[in-house]
Image (cartoon, grey):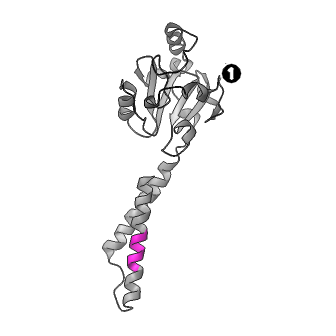
Amino acid sequence: MKKSYLTALIIISAYALHGCSDRQNATDESPTEEMAKDVSTADDAASVDAREAELVIAADDFKCLDKMTKVRHFFVDNLLAPVDATLAVAQSTTGGVYPPGSVVQLVPTEVMVKHHEGWNAATKDWEFFELDVTNEGSSIRNRGFTDVVNRFGGNCLDCHVKAKPQFDLICELDHGCDPIPISREVIAGIQAADPRCAT
């Protein structure tokens, strides 16, 4: 958001300077090539920022868990950038805010994806997905913010909102969320049976 605000200021300032010079003296020269180049650069930056403002997520963005980065008992990735910044937050014992594009996944059929700041305040910009997975890939069964319910009848946000504020809605054993009624061994078995990894 800050980037687009600054870009808008640059564009407005460039046009304002151009307009002022025309009003001051009708015989003044037109804006220099340098100013025109600055405006063009600002326009390009605004276009890039506009594309980044909306994270478009499709079923084929979700892949075999083995192709993601494992952190303790869950997996992370990033759809917009290298996974390093996402991994740093996931590995932190004190928490942090996940960067846009972050993907967090415990089991093959449930995923969280982080949108840009301001996308949805109620979910701290996370979108929840319920997937159907086969050896041919993923398909999206359900997606959204506050109303996504998994196939066991649990509302995703109702669980994740209980995480302590510093953990950015990510649940682990000591993050404040209600415990999952299955063991780590069972979860590991579900992860290992991801059918997308068979291809």
Quadrant of residue 181 within the rendered picture: top right
- Magenta-span inclusion, residue 16: yes
Please state the extent of the stretch shown in magenta in the rendering.
12-18
Mark 1 lies on residue: 153
On the image, the x and y values in percent for residue 51 come to 49, 51
On the image, the x and y values in percent for residue 135 come to 58, 21
Q: Is residue 37 above or below residue 171?
A: below
Q: Residue at x 44, y 54 (%)?
A: 48
Q: Secondary structure at mark 1?
A: loop
Secondary structure of the magenta portion, mostly? helix
Q: Amino acid at mark 1?
A: Gly
Quadrant of residue 149 within the rendered picture: top right
Q: Nearer the viewer, residue 157 or 75?
A: 157
- Magenta-span inclusion, residue 193: no
Q: Nearer the viewer, residue 165 or 51?
A: 165
On the image, the x and y values in percent for residue 17 come to 38, 77
